[in-house]
Image (spheres, helix red, strand yellow):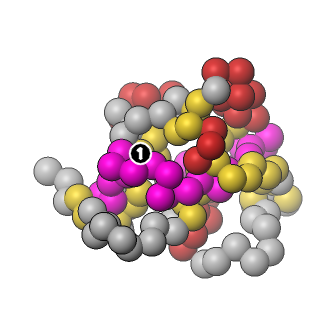
């Protein structure tokens, strides 16, 4: 059974990140919410990453894939649907149990592939 950590009421939830294809984003815009990737739907939740996890997530799950986007997601906007669960390397990862309303996504930017490596924006916390 996966360990779940809930943030205490009143604690500030950080910005979270979702790597997605351009097609997934276009579908989300057409539908008014992001319902997740094929892997998300299979697993029953939307896989998100904290800032210190997102680069390793890109390398492990999106290596060599072009035409990706990086979405900035408000953890606070996800409310009770946000769970922190043990995943890769025993680290707690944010998972959203439910679709992401577009209002929870503050920004979506390209995640370019340069010489086989995804280039993240300068200033993204590590």
Residue 94 % position (x, y): 41, 57
Badge count: 1
Give the camera-side residue of 27 and 79.
Answer: 79
Residue 101 drawn above or below residue 105? above
Left/right placement of residue 3 relative to residue 69 reads left
Magenta region includes residue 12: no
Residue plotted at (51% across, 68% down): 14
Residue 70 % position (x, y): 70, 52
Left/right placement of residue 85 relative to residue 56 reads left
Residue 3 % position (x, y): 20, 59
Give the camera-side residue of 27 and 63.
Answer: 27
Left/right placement of residue 65 relative to residue 12 reads right
Residue 112 % position (x, y): 83, 53
Q: Which residue is mark 1?
A: 96
- Look at the image and give the residue range highlighted in magenta: 60-86
Quadrant in the rendering for residue 72 = bottom right
Q: Is residue 81 visible?
A: yes
Left/right placement of residue 108 relative to residue 19 reads right
Residue plotted at (36% across, 45% down): 81
């Amino acid at each position: 059974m996966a360990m779940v950590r809930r943030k205490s009421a009143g604690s500030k939830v950080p910005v979270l990140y979702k790597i997605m294809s351009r097609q997934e984003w276009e579908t989300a815009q057409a539908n008014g919410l992001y319902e997740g990737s094929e892997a998300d739907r299979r697993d029953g939740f939307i896989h998100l990453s904290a800032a210190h996890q997102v680069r390793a997530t890109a390398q492990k799950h999106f290596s060599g894939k072009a035409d990706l986007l990086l979405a900035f997601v408000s953890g606070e906007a996800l409310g009770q649907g946000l769970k922190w669960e043990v995943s890769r390397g025993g680290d707690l990862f944010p998972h959203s149990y439910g679709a992401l309303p577009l209002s929870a996504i503050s920004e979506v930017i390209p995640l370019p592939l340069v010489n086989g490596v995804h280039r993240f924006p300068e200033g993204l916390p590590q």
